[in-house]
Image (cartoon, helix red, strand yellow):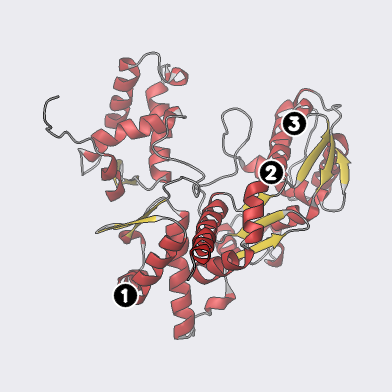
Amino acid sequence: MSTLANQLVLAERQDIARGIRLLLGLPLITERGDPPAFELIRRRQDPLTKWFDYNCGWQLVVEPRLGYARLLKIRTVPDASRPARRLRSGKAPFDRRRYTLLCVVAAELLPVPVTTVGLLADRVVHACATDEALPPFDTASRSERMAFVDVLKLLEAYGALLTVDGVTESFVDSAKAKVLYRVDATVLMRLLAAPVGPSRLAVPAQDVPLRFEELLRGTVRESRYGGADASDAQRNLRLRHSVLRRLLDDPVLHHDELGADELAYLASPTGRQIVKRAAEQGGFVLEERADGLLLVDPEAIATDSRFPDDSATARVAALLLLEPLTAAPDGLAPEQLEAEANTLLRRFPRWAKGYQSEDGAQRLTADALRVLDDFGLARRIGDRTVPRPAAFRYRTTVTDGPAT
């Protein structure tokens, strides 16, 4: 093979690996939002589509003329570790009210190619007033306008809503604000990744709270894997997809989180080979340990969140609390963790100013433990927080070296 041919093959492999990690980090990429990333995915659409389908069972939709690429990621088990977040200061997670408004706003945007913030608010008011299952929407309330703006800002970030004139945040201060939008209905319809649309789960509104977990599982049920009478091929397909989905989607995959059939698949020569090949093709470094697996992206492209990370107080505190946690294999009680947090706050009085209050240590502990739980580094057993095996990667060690 010629040198040029080798270079072309190498360039294609590098493009595919980068495209895989770009889509894992941001499953919706628009030409308007990131032209270089979209162009790479458009150019390598075929191999990327095949890679995600084979390894994860995830569908990749690339629309060059419409200018977007959407990876429809489906989790084997639904979880709330990655909520939608408010894009204003603090980036707090969406609450129930904001999720409700997100659904209503999306539905009201579909039939209108162009709208204004006032007209859209009026449509939402009317929709909520005519549906008994929805609480009323009151634009006279500042908190309601803030929730509405958070929804609009999220849709803008997704590329489903384009601001033509005005500033969305102005609606917080006045319901008479003037903002003009153009709606991208194709992107809007691609936001929902569930294989079974919620509207197809026909149940009375009053039954939804009672059957919520069951209905949530129903939205991610995939017929390709069969049921109780699944064939060997369907079972193997399910195992491959479930293991690789979790490995690619979660910070760390502990063996004790897997079922017996998934562990057997990972231990088999075929399963190990597929996992290693997928990691290599994606440009990852695969860490194999006695207690689990971890994929490391050397360029940190594939992640939406980092640890360690000094950009947020809670994440710094989480890293600092790992030292006493890993020194206590049986875990620490809440009062012990709060004492550690209190020591940190006293030791560094200019740090974590938002937590320098009477209940600051308690709030800092809660936020830090949430970070550790999200990254699979700690879990709650009874009334104690116990470190997970992956937490010991961050344990402080002291080594003796030659004097300089």
Q: Is residue 157 above or below residue 79?
A: above
Is residue 332 visible in the rendered structure shown here?
A: no
Q: Which residue is identified by label 2?
A: 33
Q: Is residue 32 above or below residue 198?
A: above
Q: Nearer the viewer, residue 195 or 286?
A: 286
State if disc 1 and disc 3 touch (CB < 8 Å): no
Give the residue at x 83% y 28%: 175
* Mark 2 element type: loop
Foreground disc of the pair 1, 2: 2
Say what amino acid the circle numbered 2 marks.
Gly
Q: Earlier in the sequence, mark 3 or mark 1?
A: 3
Q: Earlier in the sequence, mark 1 or mark 2?
A: 2
Q: Which residue is identified by label 1?
A: 268
- Position in image of residue 235 (x %, y %): 45, 79
Q: Which mark is residue 145?
A: 3
Q: Earlier in the sequence, mark 3 or mark 2?
A: 2
Tell me the crowding category of disc 3: few under 14, some 14 to 19, or many 20 or more residues within 10 angstroms, Cα based. many
Q: Nearer the viewer, residue 156 or 142?
A: 156
Say what amino acid the circle numbered 1 marks.
Ser
Residue 118 in which image quadrant: top right
Residue 255 in which image quadrant: bottom left
Q: CA distance from mark 3 to mark 1?
A: 55 Å
